[in-house]
């Protein structure tokens, strides 16, 4: 009894499709990996960081915060 290789060709194609879907899922899913695909900071977060670093004064921080809260 000889095995027909064409009979198994479809299963080979299915495994390739499964692997491709798996790889696309891994690389397309937005994981929260440090340093990669980090979420963007909101304007208020950026303002807080600038204040914490000493780039702006308390008065500038409060004024900018009022402007940002008024635009919501």
Image (cartoon, grey):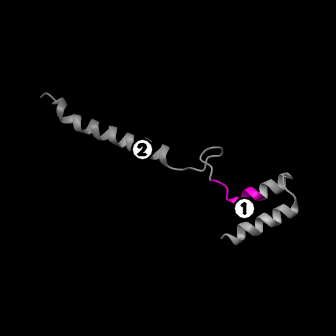
Q: Position of residue 47 (x, y in %)?
A: 76, 58
- Disc ID at residue 23: none
Q: Main secondary structure of the magenta part?
A: helix
Q: Nearer the viewer, residue 29 or 65?
A: 65
In percent of the image, x 78 and y 59: which residue is there? 48
Q: Position of residue 59 (x, y in %)?
A: 87, 64
Boundaries of the magenta span: 40-47
Badge 1 element:
helix
Q: Position of residue 34 (x, y in %)?
A: 65, 46
Badge 2 element:
helix
Q: Nearer the viewer, residue 36 or 44?
A: 44
Q: Quadrant of residue 8?
A: top left
Report the side of 9 relative to 67 (left or right).
Answer: left
In the picture of the structure, the residue carrying the numbered disc 2 is 22
Mark 1: few/some/many CA within 10 Å (<14, 14-19, 20+): some
In the picture of the structure, the residue carrying the numbered disc 1 is 44
Residue farthest left in this picture? 1
Report the side of 17 relative to 62 (left or right).
Answer: left
Q: Quadrant of residue 61?
A: bottom right
């Amino acid at each position: 009894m000889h095995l027909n290789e064409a009979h198994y060709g479809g299963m080979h194609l299915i495994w390739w499709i499964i692997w491709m879907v798996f790889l696309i899922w891994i690389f397309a899913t937005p994981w929260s990996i440090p340093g990669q695909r980090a979420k963007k900071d909101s304007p208020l977060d950026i303002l807080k960081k600038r204040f914490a670093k000493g780039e702006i004064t308390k008065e500038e921080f409060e004024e900018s915060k009022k402007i940002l809260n008024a635009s919501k």
